[in-house]
Amino acid sequence: MSKQPKAPPSFAALVQAYFAEYLTQQRALSAQTIAAYRDGFVLFLAFAESRLGKSPATMALADVTPELIMAFLDHLERQRHNSVRSRNARLAVLRSFLKFAAHRDVASLQVIERALGVPVKRFERPLFGYLSREEMLAVIGAPDDSWLSQRDHVLFLLMYNTGARVSEIIGVKVGDVVLDDNAACVHLHGKGRKQRSVPLWRSTVKAVRAWLRLNSQFDAASALLPNRNGNAMTRSNVTKRLMLAARTAATQYPRLTKQRVSPHTIRHTTAMHLLQAGVDISVIALWLGHESPVTTHHYVEADLTMKERALAKLHEPDVKIQRYRAPDSLLDFLKTL
């Protein structure tokens, strides 16, 4: 007696497996990233329900057509006033799910291939904002004797040295910092639970050592850069302290009054300064923890100074270069993530 062919998984089962198994276990994404994927999916399911008249739990993979996806993306831009960047991010979530579904439901490959044909929307990428070396040093500043000033000095110096994301910098523990003269580095815990080590300048090592002497009560599990209560700083806390430092530095460099200096501005600054110093782009990608070198190439596009130098080389070779809510079981599952 021949075996009955195994029934393909339902759309609801695929969504659940995508979040509970693929994103959480196989890709080991952070809770924050999974939440962003979930929010995008909930928006799509709510739109699909209103458009198709089907609850998410009764939808089939065949319902996810290019026409539905395009209508959803148009809805995001027109009704929800999403930027093109946000629109593309929502599309990336759907594309990721469809690629996952292709491995679980081979019978639906044709449907999936059609849906994957929906293109991203091109847009003019704004140039990265970054600080000059002099502006960056002014933001870092010379610390006074206060505890907050000492902490902020180490915070900004470490951010500039490492180019770390704000989530990485506030997650640094005392035990993550190696202060050996010949192998000084900091171990960062990045996106997707990936870890990397970044070397430290002598000035950074000196500042961290002074900070640890000032806080002898710290142990290896302590946050290196805590708030007044001894807990790790928050993103908003770092942003506020950086804005205050930029405001002070603006008295010396007035251009800073017109530029919003965020933690990501410091990350861009590190990348641009490494690039301008001649560091290979593949090394910068490792330094910043970029999963794709394409991300790092954006800094090349942003660096007008390098473009001017390239132009000078080309013409003068001898020149010295200078929400909707529905009572649905699938939606309920997504909300628990």
Image (cartoon, grey):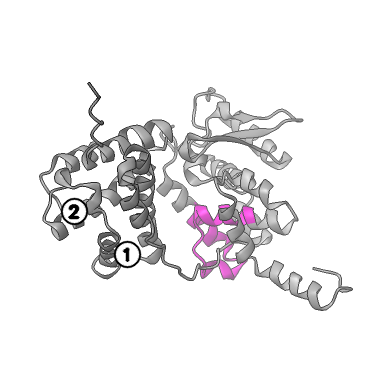
The kind of residue on which mark 2 rests is Ala
Most foreground residue, 306 or 184: 306
**Nearer the N terminus, badge 1 or badge 2?**
2
User: Which of the image's four quarters has the C terminus?
Assistant: top left
Distance between mark 1 and mark 2 Cα atoms: 16 Å
State which region is magenta. 242-271
Q: Main secondary structure of the magenta part?
A: helix
Reply yes or no: does residue 247 show up in magenta.
yes
Q: Residues within 10 Å of mark 1 (few under 14, many from 20)?
A: some
Q: Residues within 10 Å of mark 2 (few under 14, many from 20)?
A: some
Q: Position of residue 33 (x, y in %)?
A: 38, 43
Most foreground residue, 9 or 331: 9
Q: Is residue 86 left or right of residue 312?
A: left
**Residue annotated with mark 2:** 46
Most foreground residue, 54 or 287: 54
Residue displayed at 37% across by 61% down: 118
**Residue annotated with mark 1:** 82
Residue displayed at 27% across by 63% down: 67
User: Which of the image's four quarters has the N terminus?
Assistant: top left
Q: Can residue 323 be spotted in the picture?
A: no
Give the total of numbered labels.
2
Residue displayed at 89% across by 73% down: 318
Q: Position of residue 201 (x, y in %)?
A: 71, 41
